[in-house]
Image: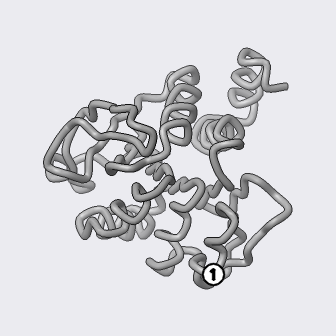
Amino acid sequence: MVYVFLANGFEETEAICPIDIMMRAGIEVELISVSDELNVVGSHGIALKAHKKINEISLADDLPELIMLPGGMPGTTNLLACRPLREIIVNASEAGVPIAAICAAPMILGKLGLLEGKRATCYGGFEKELIGAKVSRLFRVVTDGNIITGAGMGVANQFGLAIVKKIRSRKEAFRIARSIRFI
């Protein structure tokens, strides 16, 4: 099970594309709203209906295989403002759960101290927010240990495939990449 956390203002492609890729790999995905509403509206007006609200989940009850944070503005700042989400991210990281963040969302990991000494990437202009990271401008998707970061919407497929590789296998990621004509 992968938890994808959604806040109003999320970047739609950065959420939907990796979700689709994970589902093609047979990964169960739960959309979690960080607000009091199940309906979450993206930065371009596309609404998604979450499966659960953040107050309905507990890592003690069900540790996910991975946590994913789509970017977008003001989605990223809305995610960062959610104290229960910040606690979930830190607790999940301490438990060894992989965390994937794309576009502006890696700044959340930087502000929580989870990028210390790790290679990471983000959308241009947010590099200073990746506190403690070795910022890569060369690679569009970077995996370092249990952290996966992506540079933005244009690499949403590659980001999704990196998630599949991390929690399933390189072989499965390659199979999906071929089936969607990514390679």
Q: Which one is in front, 72 or 139?
A: 72
Q: Residue at x 62, y 36 (%)?
A: 164
Q: Is 178 situated left or right of 25 in this image?
A: right
The residue furthest top is 179
The residue furthest bottom is 132
Quarter occupied by the N terminus: top left
Q: Which one is in front, 10 or 148?
A: 10
User: Measured from the top left, where is residue 94 in percent x and y?
Assistant: 42, 70
Which quadrant would residue 163 be assigned to in this image?
A: top right
User: Measured from the top left, where is residue 175 in percent x and y?
Assistant: 74, 21
Q: Residue at x 55, y 64 (%)?
A: 106
Q: Which one is in front, 66 or 126?
A: 126
Total numbered circles: 1
Q: Considering only vertical position in the picture, is 86 above or below 74?
A: below
Say what secondary structure mark 1 lies in.
Answer: helix
Determine which residue is flagged by label 1: 128
Q: Residue at x 53, y 26 (%)?
A: 20
Q: Amino acid at mark 1?
A: Lys
User: Measured from the top left, where is residue 113 in percent x and y?
Assistant: 49, 81
User: Measured from the top left, where is residue 116 in percent x and y?
Assistant: 60, 81
